[in-house]
Amino acid sequence: MSVRVGSARCHFFYAVGMDTRPAKEPKDLSRFFVERANDGDLEGLMALYEPRALLAGPEGRVFLGADAIRGFYDQFLATRPKLEPGQQREPVVEGELALTSTRLVDGSVTVEIARRQEDGTWRWVIDHPFAAIQ
C-alpha cells in the first residue's frame, strides 16, 4: 500500500500478526496501543476503540467513528513510528467508565475515556492523545 503523508509518498505494509486481544483492564489500553503502533498493527489499534469512538487529533481535528479513526491511524502508521511507553496514571474507574491518562516521555499528556464492554473488557470511547503538548 502506498499513501501520501505531507509531500512524501510512503509505502506501508500492514503487520502480519494482528494482535486484537481485548483489554481486560483500562490500564491495558495504553500499553497495547504502544505495542501495536510499534508493530504497525492497524487492526490491533482499531480493536482498542468502540465503533463510534471519537479521536481528538492534532490541530483541533476530530475523527468520529471507526472509518475516520482508521484513516488517521493508517497515515500515522505509514510513518513507521517507534513509540516509547510513558508514565501511566492509575485509571479512575466509576461504574462502566474509566478515565485514563499517560505522561509521555516528551512531557505531553494523553487523556482517554474507556467504557467497559458487555463481556467485561475495555475499549476507548474518547481519546485525546494531544491533550497537553510540550
Image (cartoon, helix red, strand yellow):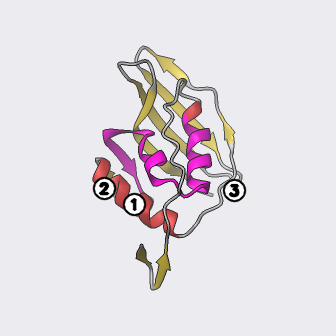
Amino acid at circle 2? Ala
Give the x, y percent position of residue 94: 46, 16
As helix, strand or loop, the secondary structure at mark 2 comes to: helix
Q: Are marks 1 and 3 in contact (CB under 8 Å)?
A: no
Which residue reaches farthest bottom? 7
- The answer to if 53 sits in the magenta stretch is yes
Q: Earlier in the sequence, mark 2 or mark 3?
A: 2
Residue 90: x and y in percent read 63, 26
For the image shown, how many numbered marks are present on the structure?
A: 3
Under circle 3, the secondary element is loop
Residue 116 shown left or right of residue 52 in the figure? right
Q: Are marks 2 and 1 in contact (CB under 8 Å)?
A: yes
Which residues make up the magenta segment?
29-57
- Residue tagged 3: 106
Asked which secondary structure carries label 1, the reply is helix
Residue 125 vs 129, above or below: the answer is: above
Q: Give residue 72's mark.
A: 1
Residue drawn at 46 percent across, 83 percent down: 9
